[in-house]
Amino acid sequence: MNHSHTEAIQKSLTHLLLSTYITTDSAEHLLLNAGWFLHSSEGCFSNVYRSPCGQYILRVGHSYADREDKYPFHACNAILNEDNPYFPKIYWHVQSIFRHFDEPLTLTLMEVLNPIDNPFKSYDCKLISEAVPVHSDEVIIPQQAFENNALAKALYSLGKVMEKHGLESDISLGNGNLMQRPSGEIVITDPYC
């Protein structure tokens, strides 16, 4: 990714979204008027936009009064583990801290990822899905995962974040939370629901 292009996108988003009071609706209006495309509005806690150049995804996350968006935990973990291929590449991550916001917003600029055509054929998907058994409140790293140092470290890191922030009942590493790069590498996208 071109570093100067990424910086220009960050500056543009800072000016567009952080120079004024915004809500989820006004962010959508501003982004669409600036040429961004609604990529997905299916997320419970977010809308996802694709940049005009098609090289970036912007996740606009929000919490509700009774339910917190847990994606910021994963985004921060991905930033701390930027060299691990199992985490998404995060270029910019901002959490609103302004008291006048009606709803706290999280803005995350990241790489474009693709759905996995057939996750059941992927050995990595199988190992990642096995790491959190149904009705479990811990990450159990399958023995086979230790054959791949990066995968073992990613799963260990997910477990540590889960423990530190009390996300035990919120973790899900099923196929819906896995995507892939154009190269075919599997990426854990949103493990804390």
Image (cartoon, grey):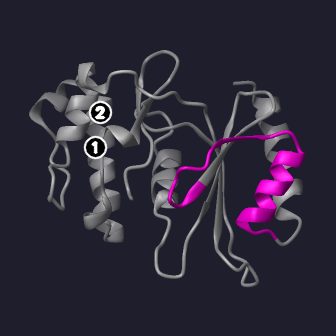
Give the quadrant of the N terminus: top right
Give the quadrant of the C terminus: bottom left
Residue at position x 24%, y 25% in the image: 120
Determine whether, in the image, residue 146 is placed left or right of residue 52: left
Q: Position of residue 182 (x, y in %)?
A: 52, 18
| Contact, mark 1 vs mark 2 (Cβ under 8 Å) | yes
Residue at position x 44%, y 32% in the image: 179
User: Residue at label 2?
Assistant: 151
How many numbered discs, if any?
2
Determine whether, in the image, residue 14 is placed left or right of residue 172: right
In this rendering, the answer to whether 47 lies above or below 24 is above
Furthest residue toward left:
143
Q: Is residue 2 magenta?
A: no
Res 137 → quadrant: bottom left
Crowd class of label 1 (few under 14; some 14 to 19; many from 20; radius 10 Å): many
Q: Which mark is residue 155?
A: 1
Q: Is residue 27 magenta?
A: yes
**Front in this rendered view, residue 61 or 150:** 61
Q: Amino acid at mark 1?
A: Leu
Res 166 → quadrant: bottom left
**Magenta highlight range:** 22-46
In this rendering, the answer to whether 56 lies above or below 81 is above
Q: Position of residue 92 (x, y in %)?
A: 68, 48
Q: Amino acid at mark 2?
A: Leu
